[in-house]
Amino acid sequence: FLCNIVTIVPEGIVMFFSSYEYEKQVYDAWMASGTISKISKKKHVFREPRSSVDVEVILNKYKEAIQSCSKGSGDTSVNGALLLAVVGGKISEGINFSDGMGRCVLMVGLPYPSPDDIELMETIKHIGNYSTSSVIGDDKPFNGNDECKLEPGFDVLRKSGKSGREYYENLCMKAVNQSIGKLMCHLSHYFALVLFLNDELICLQVEQSGM
């Protein structure tokens, strides 16, 4: 499916992952399976660096690759570039992808905040009417099950009321919208949006209305 997208969509594609670790796992899997080799036949592939000093260098290379293909110079079989980025990273927070730099945005997974964030969990306890015994405040609890091993943070979410869980989900949707918004630069700019939603948080329910 991804190989079809990079073939059809011209110029630049930005692909957002929920974390640097997840991006690395996917990239390594693509390298092992030969997917990167297939993509590279149609798009130059760039990855968001963890170091701030290297971000501008990568962005300039990404932009130059797109401009080179648009002008018809270089390898004519390559029609643009693919940038692998991270939600909440340097690229998603400070740069706009106008015109050819962003003809498609791919969102892989949902960037929920870490349940290991103690301060966040305490906030959710406070606003979510946390119960030490059972889920309260909603007749539609998270769909946890006996086979799902719950860490303490997930246990807080599971036992919090509706408002606490909505707060947690809204933080995720805010991060998604912020990343997508980097391509909404002006009225005449057009781009496609593709969401790849996975089940990395199988203990949580996500309402589409949150988008």
Image (cartoon, rainbow, N blue to C red):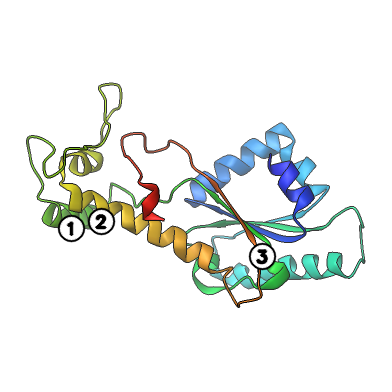
Q: Earlier in the sequence, mark 1 or mark 3?
A: 3
Residue type at mark 3 is Gly
What label sits on residue 123 in the rendered view?
1
The furthest residue to the top:
147
Q: Which of marks 2 and 1 is nearer the N terminus?
A: 1
Q: Which residue is drawn at 63% across and 73% down?
A: 56
- Depth check: give the residue in front, 50 or 156: 156
Q: How crowded is mark 3: few (under 14 residues within 10 Å), some or many (20 or more)?
A: many
Q: Mark 3 points at which residue?
A: 102
In the shown orientation, is residue 209 left or right of residue 55?
A: left
Residue 7 position in % (x across, y down): 79, 48
State which mark lies toward you, 2 or 1.
2
**What distance separates the C-alpha of mark 1 from that of mark 3?**
36 Å
| Residue 154 coordinates in the image, percent (x, y) | 25, 40
- Are discs 2 and 1 less than 8 Å apart at CB? yes
Q: Nearer the viewer, mark 1 or mark 3?
A: 3
Q: Quadrant of residue 25?
A: top right
Q: Name the residue under label 2.
A: 167
Side of 171 relative to 44 (left or right): left
Q: Where is residue 74 in the image (x, y as percent from the top left)?
A: 92, 62
> Mark 2: which amino acid?
Tyr
The amino acid at mark 1 is: Thr
Q: Position of residue 185 (x, y in %)?
A: 59, 75
Q: Which residue is drawn at 78% across and 70% down?
A: 64
For numbered disc 3, what is the local secondary structure? loop
